[in-house]
Every structure is written in C-alpha cells, then in structure tokens.
Image (cartoon, rainbow, N blue to C red):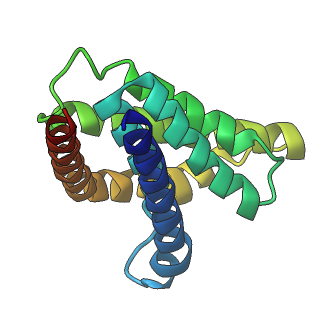
Amino acid sequence: MRYKVIAKRILIYFLLVVLAFIVQTCVFPFLSFLASTPNLILIITFTYGFIYGTEWGILCGFFAGLMMDLFYTEPFGLFILIYSYLGFFSGLFSHTYRSDSIFLPLMLCLVSEVFYNFAILAYRYMTIGELYFNYSLEHIIIPEIFFTLLVTLLVYRLLLIANRRMDRVDDLRGQQAA
C-alpha cells in the first residue's frame, strides 16, 4: 500500500512540474505587464524540499531540472544539478522550522533565486567569456526575484494546503486498510 502512495506522489510532483513549466514558458511571456517571468519551477522545488525534506526536494528538483534540460540549450544536466541542490538545501530546513510561517519560505525563495541566477550567470561567463553583470542584475535578476517572491506568497500557500489534504487522505486510507 505504501508503494502506491509513493508512486502517486511522484506522479503528482512530475505533473505539477510539467504544468508549472508550461505556464512559465508558454503563458507568462505573453503577459505584457510582467517585466520578467516568475520562476514557478523554482517555487515548487523549494516548497517540496521545505515541506517534505531533502529526499523529496532532490526528487522534485530532478524532475524540474529534467524539464528545463530537455527544452533549453544548456548542456544536459546543468539544470538537474542546480534544482537538485536547491531542493536539497531547502529540505535541510524541513524539520527545524514550521511550514506555516511565510517568512522562512520567502527567505528560502530569495536565497534559491539568487543561487539559481548566479549559477546560470557563472555558467554563461565560463562559456562566453564575458560577464554582463550590471545588465543582468538590472534587467533579469532583480525583476525575476521580485516577481518570484510575489508569486511565492500565493503558490506556497496553495501547495501547502494541497499537500496537507493529500497527507490526510493518505493517512485515512492507511487507517482503513489496517
């Protein structure tokens, strides 16, 4: 019975990452009022790491990175590595702090977003050889951080409520089977 619950969770994580990827790449760019697109995949990765721990954070980060690696031109594995690290890092805080608070998830989002953007910037510096730091900071990194933090306020709460509901349903099924 436990394997069915784990398989269901993995399928839900994968579908959620696919949905977030579609919205992030196909819907948000067409919204003209957005200066930059919020990173939904990053929000999902750090949220699942923070709620369920390092193992689930790495798993969700793997799916998120796989989606990004399959559809972008950077070398295969770069995004898997970045998102897996982000899932692991946010999972380190899962047993220490309450998931009800919004302050720590916002701080995790901020740290994850800064790490993600600077990792991509460092990679592009190593491949191109030039660093357009001021332009990247002003036109890409800061607007993306701002919009990602705003979207985190809503998406984190929705994911937390949905996961608590799934936990209750899974606990009830386990009690009925016993």
Q: Quadrant of the C terminus?
A: top left
Q: Quadrant of the N terminus?
A: top left
- Residue 172 located left or right of residue 56: left
In the current view of this chain or complex, which residue is farthest to the front?
Answer: 178
Residue beneath the point at 26% across and 52% down: 159
**Picture quadrant of residue 130:** top right
Residue beneath the point at 54% across and 57% down: 140
User: Can the viewer see residue 61?
Assistant: yes
| Residue 104 against residue 6 in the figure, above or below | above
In the current view of this chain or complex, which residue is farthest to the top?
Answer: 96
Can you give x and y, in whole percent of width and height, for residue 72 in the image?
74, 61
- Residue 58 located left or right of residue 151: right
Can you give x and y, in whole percent of width and height, for residue 87 in the image?
48, 32
Residue beneath the point at 18% across and 48% down: 169
State how many labels appear.
Answer: 0
User: Can the viewer see residue 39?
Assistant: no
Looking at the image, which is closer to me, 24 or 13? 13
Can you give x and y, in whole percent of width and height, for residue 44 in the image?
40, 49
Looking at the image, which is closer to me, 46 or 163? 163
- Residue 146 located left or right of residue 175: right
